Structure formats: C-alpha cells, structure tokens
Image: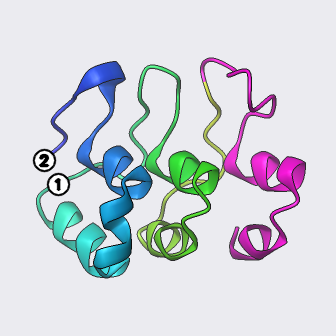
Amino acid sequence: MDILFVERNTCLHYLVEHPIREMFHPKLLIRIMLKYNAEVNIQNNYGDTPLYRAVEYEAVEFITALLHAEASVFIKKRKISVRWTSLTPTAITNQTYLSKLLNLL
C-alpha cells in the first residue's frame, strides 16, 4: 500500500492534506490503509510523516486517528522547511499555538 509518489509521499500523506478528507471518516480510511500494510510512520523526502502533515493541515480527526494507529510524535524531520523551524509534530503545535492539537499529542 505504500506506493511512493512525488517527494516520496504516500497515500496517507496525501489523504491528510487533501480536501476530500472532510468527506470521509478518518478512522475508517486509516484503518483500511493499515489493513493493506500502509506504514503509519513512513517519512517522505523532507522527513514528514502522515502525522506531521496532519498537524500542519490542522486535520484534528486525522491526528486522532493516526495517534490511535500508533503514529509516533517523536520522529524528526530530515529537512527543515521555511515555514516550520521545529522538528517534531509536538514542537509544531507548540510553535503555532494550536492548543487543540497539542492536547491530542
């Protein structure tokens, strides 16, 4: 299931950032992907995991679903982007004052 696309993004990476995510139940989608061996902690070329992307897009339901699927909050990025200077999903929530997300992590 971990088909790698541009910048080594997987279906899980795209799922959490795509507007279609609002149309479906996150836990169900992630459970289906995990059933077909999707790796919840896989990193793209920048070191972003699906959880990291979900935090960036403030996709709260996906954050919750990924955490229930045992996504790690401790994986660090390989490259630091211009927008984010911190290295873990927890650090991003601290930096951007997303208290709702921080409570989930």
Stretch in magenta: 78-105
Check if residue 91 falls in the magenta segment: yes
Q: Residue at x 43, y 33 (%)?
A: 43
In the visual, does 67 lie left or right of 25?
A: right
Q: Amino acid at mark 2?
A: Met
- Residue at disc 1, secondary structure: loop
Q: Badge 2 is on which residue?
A: 1
In this view, the residue farthest toward the front is 19
Q: Residues within 10 Å of mark 2 (few under 14, many from 20)?
A: few
In the visual, does 28 lie left or right of 36?
A: right
Asked if labels 1 and 2 touch by Cβ distance under 8 angstroms, the answer is yes
Q: Amino acid at mark 1?
A: Asn
When the figure is inspected, residue 26 is found, relative to residue 42, above or below; the finding is below
> Where residue 68 appears, x then y in whole percent?
47, 75
> Where residue 100 appears, x then y in whole percent?
76, 75
Q: Badge 1 is on which residue?
A: 37
Q: Quadrant of residue 29?
A: bottom left
- Residues 19 and 13: in front is 19
